[in-house]
Amino acid sequence: MLKNKVVDIYTYSKTEKVKESALSELFDKYEELAGDNLLLLYFADKVSFIRLSALSDTIQTDTLLEGRIFNGNAELHFWKIENNLYKYRFRCESKASKTDNVFVYDDTHGLWDFDREKNALVDRNKGIYIPFPLDTKSGSMKLTVRNYLTPDEFGRLYFYDARFVNIKNDKNEVVYE
């Protein structure tokens, strides 16, 4: 359901060449993402869901396609546009230096089943296991995605952007924000 409010958001986009540790340095650039946040990395051959503190000094960028580091207030989303060239977007709802008025709509998406024994998200039909960086007793996990909608010149709302906000367990309790 569309929230009946408008929020001020800050967006910054830039294209940069990725060197051995450029992505790691980018993670440290925004104070809103300070701390042990979650990092979701999409590679051509796998998906990794890790805590930022568990990240090694460099990321293997040869097969890295996309990534997101997020918390309840901000997200840094980056994606490959060509060899060793990535574009990124930083979104934060509390930064006020540059604003766009948009409507927000929070949507919840299931993250497969949760295997407590392996501490992993699983799709048993496909035999896929993704190690999960949070300790939980839950049987399933849900990802909250905040969708941003903005009006066009005629007042019609259209999709503007989206970011990850939090993860909830099967009791709808926030286990990460």
Image: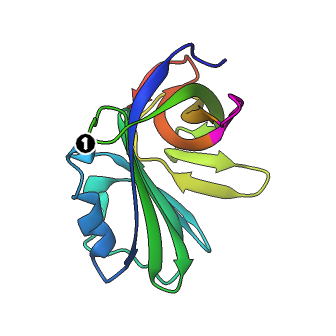
- Residue situated in front as seen by the camera: 87 or 69: 87
Identify the coloring: rainbow
Magenta portion: prevailing SS class: loop
Label 1: state its secondary structure.
helix
Q: Tag 1: Cα neighbours inside 10 Å, few (<14), some, or many (≥20)?
A: many
On the question of residue 142 being in view, the answer is yes
- Residue situated in front as seen by the camera: 168 or 166: 166
- Residue at x-position 37% and y-position 74%: 59
Is residue 173 in the magenta section?
no
Q: Which residue is mark 1?
A: 32
* View extreme (front): residue: 153
On the question of residue 40 being in view, the answer is no
- Residue at x-position 25% and y-position 42%: 32
- Residue at x-position 67% and y-position 17%: 1
The percent position of residue 147, horizontal first and vertical second, equals 58, 35
Query: Is 30 on the left or on the right of 100, as rendered?
Result: left
* View extreme (top): residue: 4
Query: Is 48 on the left or on the right of 27, as rendered?
Result: right
Q: Is residue 86 above or below residue 114?
A: below
Which quadrant does the C terminus fall into?
top left
- Residue situated in front as seen by the camera: 35 or 54: 35
Give the total number of marks visible in the rendering.
1
- Residue at x-position 57% and y-position 16%: 3
- Residue situated in front as seen by the camera: 126 or 83: 83
Query: Is 22 on the left or on the right of 131, as rendered?
Result: left
Q: Is residue 148 above or below residue 45?
A: above
Question: What's drawn in magenta, residue-wise?
Answer: 152-159
Q: Is residue 127 above or below residue 150?
A: below
Q: Type of residue at label 1? A: Glu
